[in-house]
Amino acid sequence: MLSTKCTRLLLVSIVLTFLSCQPASTAEQADSQESAGTKYLIIHADDAGMSHSVNKGTIDSMEQGIVSSASIMVPCPWFPEFAEYAREHPEGDYGIHTTLNSEWEFYRWGPVAPRDQVPSLVDKDGFLWDNVEQVAANAKAHEVEIELRAQIDKAIQFGVPLSHIDTHMGAIISRPDLLEIYVSLGIDYDLPVMWVRQFDEATAREYPALAERGDQLLNVIDKHGLPVLNGIGQFYGGETHEERVGNYRHFLQNLESGVTQLIIHCGYDDEELQHITTSVSRRDGDRRIFTDPEIIAEIEEAGVQVINWKQFREMYKRPVELAD
C-alpha cells in the first residue's frame, strides 16, 4: 500500500515542479505552495527501533495505513530489526530520531559511541540521561556531536536509506549550541532537519534556544536549500481513544495550506510494550487511528496530499533544467 501511495504522490511532486517555469528560492517556493492553498501532510511515526511492538506497529501503519514516514532511535535494542526492514524496503521514508535521553524506568539504553568518548551524556549507570533537563544541564556539545554522528553513521552502515533528521523529546534543541549542531548535521549529511518557518509562542517558551537562534539558523537552512515545514502537530492529550480520535479529526479538518508534519507514535498494546511505557494505549491508539479506513477516507476527501520527506525535498528543488 505504501509503495502505491508513494508512486501517486511522487507524481504530484513532479507536476508541482513542472508548473514552475522560472527558478525560485526555496523560501519563494514554500510561499508559492502555501498561497496556492494546497494542504500537504507528512504523517510521521516517531520511535521506530525502540521495541519490537513499536517496530511492528510502525511497519503495519505504513503498509496497512496512511503513515508516510518514520524516524529511528538508533541506540535502542530493537534498532537492528527496523534497520533490516528499512534496508529491504527502500521505497519507505526513514529519518534519524536523534536520541540523547533514555526515559523509561527499567527499559534503558546507552550511547552508540563508546562511553569513554561521551562521558557527559551518561548517568552513573552508563545509560543516556533520563530527561531533557538532565541533557541540557550535563551534556558537552562536542560529545553530543560525536554521539549523533555515531548514530547517523550506524544507520548508514546498516543500510538504512535516510531522508531526514529530527529530535527525540527535543533534547537536541534544548540549548543554542546543541541547536547549532542539529542544523550542522543536516548540512554535513545533506539531510533535511525537522524545522518550521515560524515556531509558535508555546514552543519558543519551552525551548528558548529557538527564540535565541531560530531566525539565524533558518537563514542557514534556507541558504543550503533544505526544506522547511509550515507547521507541526502532535497530541499527547486525550484520556480516551474517542477523545484522541476527535483531536486528530479536529486537527485534520483545520489543517492549513503548506506542508505540515503530524507526529504520532505507533505500537501494539501487548505485554512487551506494557512493561516498557505508560503510553502504551496511546501508541496502540495511534496505530489504530491511522490504519482506520474511515480516517484514511476522510483525509483523502478533505483534499489533503499525504507526502513523505523525500517528496517534500523534491518539491523544494530548483528546476534549473527548465530555466535553460
Image (cartoon, rainbow, N blue to C red):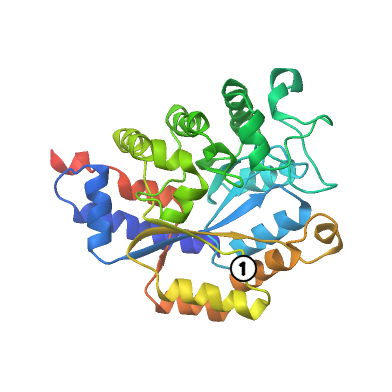
Question: Which amino acid does the dot numbered 1 rest on?
Answer: Gly
Residue 146: where, in percent of width, then height? 61, 23
Give the residue at mark 1.
237
| The one of 28 and 168 positioned closer to us in this rendering | 168
Residue 292 in sight in this render = no
Q: Can residue 68 be spotted in the picture? A: yes
Whether 297 is drawn above or below 173: the answer is: below
Residue 227 is drawn in which quadrant?
top left
**Which residue is painted at 23% across and 43% down in the image?**
319
Q: Position of residue 186 (x, y in %)?
A: 46, 34
> Relative to the observer, which residue lies in front, 18 or 221?
221
**Residue 30, percent from left and from top:** 28, 52
Is 204 placed left or right of 100 in the picture?
left
The image shows a total of numbered marks equal to 1
Residue at screen point 63% across, 45% down:
72
Going 73% across and 68% down the picture, which residue do you hit? Answer: 281
The front one of 179 and 315 is 179
Report whether 16 appears left or right of 108. left
For residue 67, side relative to residue 267 (left or right): left
Percent across and percent down for residue 63 are 61, 63
Badge 1 marks a residue whose secondary structure is: loop
Farthest residue to the top: give it.
116
| Quadrant (top left, top right, bottom left, bottom right) of the N terminus | bottom right
Q: Crowdedness of circle 1 by 10 Å Cα count: few (<14), some, many (20+)?
A: few
Residue occupying the point 33% across, 56% down: 13
Q: In the picture shown, does residue 49 fall above or below 263? A: above
The quadrant of the picture occupied by the C terminus is top left
